[in-house]
Amino acid sequence: PAAPTPPAGGAANADQLYDEAIKKLQEGDYAAAERGFKTFIQRNPQNKLARNAQYWLGETYYARRDYNSALTAFAEGYKVYKTSPKGPDNLLKLGITLAGLGRKADACQVFAKFNQDYPRATDLQKRLNTEINAIMMSPEVKAKMEAMAVEPVNETAERFSEIARAEARISENQVQLA
């Protein structure tokens, strides 16, 4: 079924469209929620709820394991709404999505950017540290860290960034030697 199509214009119609998309999301009808959020954003790009709609659009993809579409939605949310209250959420979820796609080095860069851009987002930093520790404990990363003689326990985002940069320098040196 198609997303609701209320007449364009009017805050009441915009709010109704957003609320219907949220309801679909809560019901687990992610495809309908996706259509609703897309319609809302297209019709109401300047509405105060557009930043939330963009984030939740990403979540509709993420919930269905469409990580490439989620990646695009979260990146767009960060780019367009960086200074809004949803900016940190989009950036954090962008990093989580990259990690889910196996792009751990890219995720590290995003997590480092998170601490640069949002040093006061303490609740999200706790979640960030949890996500970083999960990545750090993956067999692939643990093996690389052991090879570098680094201990992957309770790393902070800053320390994780240092490790990622060191790993990148090692990789660059190996490429230059080859």
Image: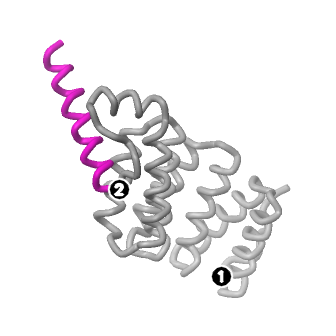
177 vs 48, left or right, is left
Give, as a three-letter code, the residue at label 1. Gly
Secondary structure that dominates the magenta span = helix
Where is mark 2, residue-wise? 156
What separation in Å lies between label 2 and label 1 (alpha carbons)? 46 Å
Q: Which mark is residue 9?
A: 1
Query: By what rule are the colours in the image chosen?
Result: one colour
Q: Quadrant of residue 4?
A: bottom right
39 vs 5, left or right, is left
Tell me the residue at 67%/55% (across/down). Answer: 60
Q: Is residue 57 above or below residue 159?
A: below
Quadrant location of the C terminus?
A: top left
The secondary structure type at the circle numbered 1 is loop
151 vs 13, left or right, is left
Please give the range of residues in magenta.
156-178
Q: Which mark is residue 142?
A: none
Q: Is residue 79 above or below residue 19?
A: above
Instruction: Say which of 112 and 158 sits in front.
Output: 158
Tell me the residue at 65%/69% (across/down). Answer: 40
The secondary structure type at the circle numbered 2 is loop
Tell me the residue at 20%/20% (across/down). Answer: 175
